[in-house]
Image (spheres, rainbow, N blue to C red):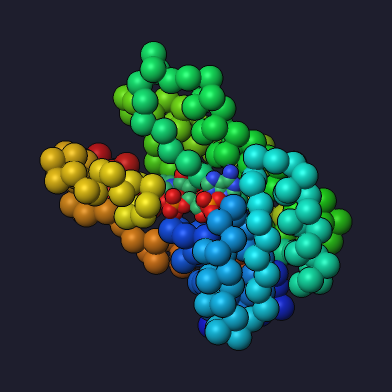
Amino acid sequence: MTEQALAGRTAIVTGASRGIGRVTALALAGAGADVALAARDTDALDRVRAEAEKLGVRAVATRTDVTRSEDVRAMVADTVAELGRVDILVNNSGVVSSTELLETTDAEWDRVLDTNLRGTFLATREVGRHLVAQGSGKVINMASNFAFKGIPGHAAYSASKAAVVAFTRSMALEWARHGVQVNALAPGYVATDLNADVRADPDALNRILRGVPARRMGRADELAPWIVLLASPASDFMTGETIVIDGGQAAR
Ligand SMILES: NC(=O)c1ccc[n+]([C@@H]2O[C@H](COP(=O)([O-])OP(=O)(O)OC[C@H]3O[C@@H](n4cnc5c(N)ncnc54)[C@H](OP(=O)(O)O)[C@@H]3O)[C@@H](O)[C@H]2O)c1
C-alpha cells in the first residue's frame, strides 16, 4: 500500500475523541484522507482535529451522540457540506458495562445496546445513502472478541458486539453489488480509558493477562493499520469479514 493510499477520500470516524477512535482518525489522516470526527466531547474532538490538520489534511469535528438519529443526520450532512464527499465510515463509538445480569437495569442495557448497536445502525444508514449512490465506499465496524466468547458480567456488551458482527455480514451482502464493502475488527484487550479500571487493579490485570497468550494488552496503534487497509482499495474484494486482533486469545 502506498503512503497516501487514501488521498482524495473522506472518512468519518465516530468516537474519535480518544482511544482507538482518535488513533484511527490520525492514521486515516496520515494515509491522506480528510477526516470528520464525531463524538460528544467537543474539546477533545477539537484537539484531535488540530492534530489531523497538522498531517496536511482537512478535518472537521461535529458534536454527535450516535444514539440520536438527528445528531447522526446532521453530522453526515456537515461532513458532506464541508468536505465535499464521504467514502469511509468507521463505526467506533462504544461503551462497556460490567454488571451481572440480575443487577443490570433497563437503562444500562439500553445505554450499551443503543451506543454499540443502534449507533452503528444509524451511522451506517446515513452514510450508506451516499456510498450506495456513488457506487463505492467502505464501512468498518468495531466489534470485539467478546462477540465470540461467553464473558460473565458482560452480557449486554457481548450481545451488542455479536450483533455488530451479524450486522456486518448482512450489510456486506446488501451492498456488495453497489461496490460498498462492510467489514469489522474484533480486538481483544487494548489499553484505553475503556479498561482503565482493570489496568489500575494489578490483581484484575494479572487475571486478564493470564488469558492472553501475548501476556499484554494491545495498543490502539496496532489496530489502526488494519483499519487503513480495510478503508483502502487493497480490500476491495473483501466484505462481510471480521478480523480478530487479540494477542492470540482466539487461537486457544
Ligand atoms: N479497549 C478495548 O479493549 C476494546 C476491545 C474491543 C473492542 N473495543 C471497542 O473499540 C471501540 C473504542 O473503544 P476505546 O477502547 O477506544 O474506548 P474509549 O477510549 O472509552 O473511547 C470510546 C469512544 O466512544 C465515544 N462514545 C461513547 N458513547 C458515545 C455516544 N453516545 N456518541 C458518540 N460517541 C460516543 C467516546 O466519545 P465521547 O465520550 O466524547 O462521546 C469515545 O471517543 C468501542 O466500540 C469498544 O467497544 C475496545
> Does residue 45 appear left or right of residue 60 in this picture?
left
Q: Please identify the residue farthest to the right as the structure is shown.
A: 133
Residue 133 lies, with reference to residue 198, above or below; the image says: below
Q: Residue at x 36, y 25 (%)?
A: 99
Residue 193 shows in the view: yes
Q: Position of residue 156 (x, y in %)?
A: 46, 27
Compare residues 252 and 146 and report the one nearer the observer: 146
Compare residues 212 and 101 and report the one nearer the observer: 101
Q: How many marks?
A: 0
> Does residue 208 appear left or right of residue 144 in this picture?
left
Q: Position of residue 165 (x, y in %)?
A: 54, 38
Q: Residue at x 82, y 51 (%)?
A: 129
Q: Please identify the residue farthest to the front as the structure is shown.
A: 43
Residue 240 shows in the view: no
> Does residue 64 appear left or right of residue 157 in this picture?
right
Q: Residue at x 52, y 33 (%)?
A: 112
Q: Position of residue 215 (x, y in %)?
A: 18, 52
Q: Position of residue 33 (x, y in %)?
A: 64, 74
